[in-house]
Image (spheres, rainbow, N blue to C red):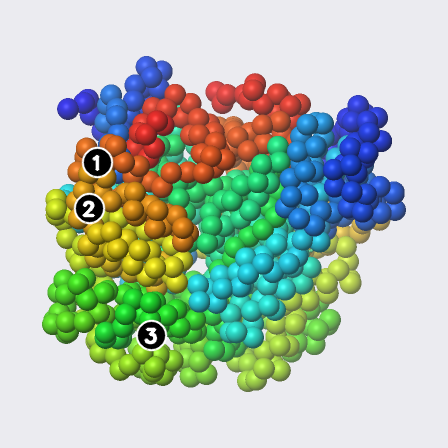
């Protein structure tokens, strides 16, 4: 086990990284380490965790803004928000359970570093869209800030959002400031039964084109729908196409009727009340329909909704795959049988010809060290990516190999 | 106006001009070039009109390939390039220098693809903001960011400035509504950043490009999200006896869990001028006016406006007026939308653009009046209250150099105040030359160095829109073409 650094304050974190940078020692950055067994297997001399940097530093409910130290657990943030009737609108997903790590351990810094967002992303944007500002230390040991705490800010380059999705390879965030949202007063779900994938995606698109502010649009083919736990849907035995409405109480029935009318041709949906709706979408937050297993690998594919069923069908020609379509089809979680390359060649080919990109989320460490976990970059984008990496971390110390094999 | 410094033109480049013209002609043809002085003069300034410089040449490409050829040529010949859309920048973002080429993409305004099933459109970036919505409105969609300049400004300018508008409280600003761009780097390389999928692959380079004020590359195409049009929308007006009451009311609305699509604020001075101009029916006996708009079905609108009226009642409003019909709604917005023009009829003005945390609103308004009074000037305040984006309009007489100078000084003091209160230097107009030297009030030397290194990755010799955004003293080495010696922060 490598040496562990656990700074308790921002200045301490900065001085540690500055020293490690002088000594040119590779640093593995972790939040609570909930996902150390996913992603590429990084090589490092020391581990630096933000788990000692905790606490909400600013919360203005009437301005819908919060700041927190990066190691603050997400559940802590969500409970502070809930007490004031608010939430993280982008509905962070906890991948711990599906990747064999403990659930409930996400850090808020890890959330923004990986830019992961749940089902509500289609109506409120991603984690990145909700980020307002960061304080961070780069691989040179320099502390810098970007963005701020106000919603509108165009002073200088948007470095804060630029850090989202960089997996701790550019800088270690010490504090993040983000938008929060009011909790919806009530919610309901419509579940259409038995639609084939392409027709289901069409139905979701029709729903998303209405002004009814659908806040979740998911399709589960039959073999995936069977894994649901919610009583009302558990034994349906057919594919399920799910639409969530969240609004104020006096309006929900009106919206539901309008949505049913708009989707008449797709059949008569099963209706879920607020409690059932809450349980159902909580299942998606832990991806319980894609449970941890060493017999399968898990892919995450980002594409155009209309292309998603084609991609899944193309992959299914080569292997048994179970799909879960989120974001009205723009995001596909795909479980494939474990194989030497986790099916990478076929998955990437199927995606490449139809547009989009695929990330390997779950596979044995040996596979994740040999197969590209993230979609390989086009040469000119790779050139810029390497340039950005070396602007922030010229010696390649932070999370070396976490995203790409050689940097 | 005197005090913003513009770099001296490079006489070496000017001497080479005839050769450069020939070189460009042979690569993209004569018809794309504007060489004559009258033609070039049309590009000497943007909407920040107090500064002007006639560029040495203007090019109006029609395709990405032509943009690529032009940039490659400029790169090889060490010529500065100022990207330009419609020139409505309010911070001097597209202001040229005499030794630079203006590359204006306003001719690139085609719709490439509209994909309703996936709710996106791919467009050439010279299309105007309003044209995008016009193309898709019949199918029940719109493009959400709505800067007040939307009739004229281009998608490219919006991307470069990360523009927002009255409705961004609900729909976000440009960066929330873009999936990808096609951009040409200074060496002529064409890159696709982002794409049409919702999630990006690898580093979020798109976030760096949006709002980069023409510093990283020339954007030629973009893929935008299409948003379903709401069933209906209706505003209400609430007049208050004090700015404090109006500010508290905004907070109370949001605390109640209601997020209107827009909350616009006007102070007494602004109300008077706008009413005189537009006859919108604004109350003249109030100190602050809120225009609050909500969306939804008829019944939802009724419920929401009713609840907002109840909340407002707690702050002892003088008037509460819910729009009864489309006509009245249009009139209410006409006053607000004409505000800048209306004020322009009675006085020259400097339009500031800072953002503050909402809780600081009453304090900020008091200080703004004090600051302007210290300089012997009047001020009218109009702003997007939902997100604390202030637009103090400092009134002055442009024929008096002294007043002009005072207005600039007062403006500077106001922006510093915004930063002090926890806000920022610019909410939507950008930094350009206007706020370039003020960047040090918001950012440390390291913060700025981090940003400048990113510029250097994209534009190693600093030929794209140099002398904007970053304080001159910080960027002089890089602008001299010595990116290799980029200063390291202490
Ligand atoms: C390849 C891959 C793809 C994923 N995709 C998704 C997804 O699509 N949706 C989803 O819901 N979840 C996704 N996850 C899981 C998500 O990353 C984790 O749920 C979350 O980051 C766990 O938080 P943590 O702090 O415990 O994580 P850790 O495992 O400790 O850290 C996660 C990553 O964030 C970095 N990091 C942590 N803290 C900081 C910080 N303060 N500053 C900078 N970097 C930091 C780490 O270096 C590491 O790269 C994915 C994970 C992997 C490996
Ligand atoms: C009356 C009025 C009202 C306004 N209201 C608003 C408002 O409500 N909200 C708001 O946000 N702004 C507003 N603005 C400011 C301005 O309209 C916006 O900044 C707009 O986005 C500029 O677009 P443009 O096409 O005119 O760009 P230009 O002024 O031509 O250029 C602006 C910047 O973009 C860069 N640029 C232009 N084209 C490209 C390209 N192809 N690639 C890379 N960089 C490029 C330029 O170099 C420059 O830095 C207003 C302006 C006016 C005059």
Per the model, the C-alpha gap separating discs 1 and 2 is: 10 Å
The x, y position of residue B81, in whole percent, is 69, 36
Residue A65 falls left or right of residue B261: left
Mark 3 or 1 closer to N-term?
3
- Counting residues from the start of the chain, the first of labels 3 and 2 encountered is 3
Q: Is there a contact, CB below 8 Å, between mark 1 and mark 2?
A: yes
Element on which disc 2 rests: strand
**Residue B241 shown left or right of residue A44 in the figure:** right
Q: Are marks 3 and 1 in contact (CB under 8 Å)?
A: no
- For label 3, the residue is A248
Find disc 1 in the rendering and name its residue: A367
Which residue sits furthest top? A23
User: Dot 2 corresponds to which residue?
Assistant: A297
Question: Residue B291: horizontal and vertical position, in percent?
Answer: 55, 70
Residue closest to the eye, A383 or A276: A383
**Residue B43, numbered label:** none
């Amino acid at each position: 086990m490598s040496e562990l650094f656990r700074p308790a304050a921002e200045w301490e974190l900065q001085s540690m990284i500055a020293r490690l940078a002088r000594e040119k020692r590779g640093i593995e950055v972790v939040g609570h380490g909930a996902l150390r067994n996913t992603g590429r297997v990084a090589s490092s001399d020391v581990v630096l965790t933000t788990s000692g940097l905790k606490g909400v530093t600013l919360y203005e409910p009437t301005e819908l803004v919060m700041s927190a130290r990066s190691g603050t657990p997400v559940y802590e943030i969500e409970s502070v928000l809930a007490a004031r009737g608010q939430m993280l609108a982008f509905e962070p997903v906890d991948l711990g359970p599906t990747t064999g790590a403990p659930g409930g351990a996400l850090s808020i810094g890890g959330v923004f570093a990986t830019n992961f967002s749940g089902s509500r992303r289609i109506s409120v944007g991603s984690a990145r869209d909700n980020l307002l500002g960061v304080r961070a230390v780069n691989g040179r040991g320099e502390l810098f800030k970007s963005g701020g705490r106000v919603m509108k800010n165009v002073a200088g380059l948007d470095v804060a959002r630029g850090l989202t999705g960089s997996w701790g390879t550019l800088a270690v965030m010490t504090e993040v400031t983000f938008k929060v949202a009011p909790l919806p007063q009530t919610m309901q779900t419509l579940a259409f039964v038995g639609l084939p994938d392409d027709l289901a995606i069409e139905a979701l698109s029709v729903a998303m084109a209405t002004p009814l502010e659908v806040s979740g649009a998911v399709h589960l083919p039959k073999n995936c729908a069977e894994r649901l736990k919610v009583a009302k849907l558990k034994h349906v035995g057919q594919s399920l196409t799910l639409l969530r409405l969240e609004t104020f109480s006096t309006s929900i029935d009106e919206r539901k009727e309008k949505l049913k009318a708009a989707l008449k041709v797709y059949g008569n949906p099963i209706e879920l009340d607020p409690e059932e709706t809450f349980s159902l979408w909580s299942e998606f937050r832990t991806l319980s329909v894609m449970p941890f297993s060493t017999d399968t690998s898990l892919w995450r594919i980002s594409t155009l909704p209309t292309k998603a069923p084609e991609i899944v069908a193309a992959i299914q020609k080569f292997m048994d795959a179970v799909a879960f379509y989120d974001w009205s089809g723009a995001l596909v979680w795909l479980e494939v049988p474990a194989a030497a390359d986790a099916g990478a060649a076929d998955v990437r080919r199927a995606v490449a010809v139809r547009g989009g990109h695929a990330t390997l989320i779950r596979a044995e460490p040996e596979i994740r060290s040999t197969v590209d976990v993230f979609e390989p970059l086009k040469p000119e984008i790779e050139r810029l990516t390497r340039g950005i990496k070396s602007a922030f971390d010229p010696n390649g110390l932070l999370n070396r190999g976490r995203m790409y094999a050689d940097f | 106006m005197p005090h913003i410094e513009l770099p001296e033109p490079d006489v070496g480049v000017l001497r080479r001009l005839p050769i450069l013209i020939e070189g460009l002609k042979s690569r993209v043809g004569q018809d794309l070039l504007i060489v004559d002085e009258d033609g070039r003069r049309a590009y000497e300034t943007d909407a920040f009109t107090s500064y002007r410089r006639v560029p040495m040449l203007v090019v109006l490409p029609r395709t990405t390939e032509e943009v690529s050829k032009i940039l490659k040529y400029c790169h090889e010949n060490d010529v500065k390039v100022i990207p330009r859309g419609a020139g409505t920048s309010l911070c001097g973002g597209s202001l040229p220098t005499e030794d630079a080429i203006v590359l204006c993409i306003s001719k690139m305004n085609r719709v490439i693809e509209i994909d309703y099933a996936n709710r996106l459109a791919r467009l050439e970036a010279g299309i105007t903001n309003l044209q995008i919505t016009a193309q898709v409105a019949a199918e029940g969609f719109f493009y959400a960011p709505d800067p007040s300049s939307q009739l004229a400004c281009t998608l490219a300018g919006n991307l470069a400035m990360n523009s927002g508008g009255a409705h961004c409280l609900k729909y976000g600003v440009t960066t929330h509504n873009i999936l990808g761009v096609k951009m040409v780097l200074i060496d002529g390389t064409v890159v696709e950043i982002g794409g049409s999928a919702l999630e990006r692959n690898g580093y979020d380079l798109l976030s760096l490009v949006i709002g980069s004020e023409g510093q990283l590359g020339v954007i030629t195409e973009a893929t935008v999200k299409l948003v379903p049009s709401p069933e209906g929308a209706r505003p209400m007006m609430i007049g208050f006896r004090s700015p404090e009451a109006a500010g508290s009311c905004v907070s109370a609305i949001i605390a109640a869990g209601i997020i209107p699509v827009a909350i616009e604020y006007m102070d007494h001075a602004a109300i008077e001028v706008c009413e005189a101009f537009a006859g919108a029916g604004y109350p003249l006996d109030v100190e602050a006016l809120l225009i609050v708009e909500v969306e939804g079905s008829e019944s939802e609108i009724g419920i929401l406006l009713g609840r907002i009226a109840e909340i407002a009642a707690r702050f002892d409003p003088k008037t509460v007026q819910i729009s009864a019909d489309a006509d009245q709604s249009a009139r209410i917005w006409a006053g607000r939308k004409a505000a800048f023009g209306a004020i322009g009829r009675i006085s020259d003005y400097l339009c500031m653009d800072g953002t503050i945390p909402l809780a600081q609103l009453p304090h900020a308004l008091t200080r703004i009046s004090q600051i302007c009074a210290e300089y012997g000037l009047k001020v009218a305040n109009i702003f997007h209250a939902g997100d604390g984006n202030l637009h103090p309009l400092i009134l002055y007489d442009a024929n008096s150099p002294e007043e002009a100078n005072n207005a600039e000084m007062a403006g500077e003091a106001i922006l510093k105040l915004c930063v002090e209160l926890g806000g920022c230097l610019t909410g939507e107009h950008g930094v350009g030359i206007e706020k370039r030297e003020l960047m040090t009030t918001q950012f440390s030397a390291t913060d700025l160095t981090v940003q400048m290194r990113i510029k250097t990755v994209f534009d190693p010799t600093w030929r794209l829109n140099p002398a904007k955004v970053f304080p001159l003293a910080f960027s002089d080495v890089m602008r001299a073409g010595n990116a290799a010696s980029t200063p390291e922060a202490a």
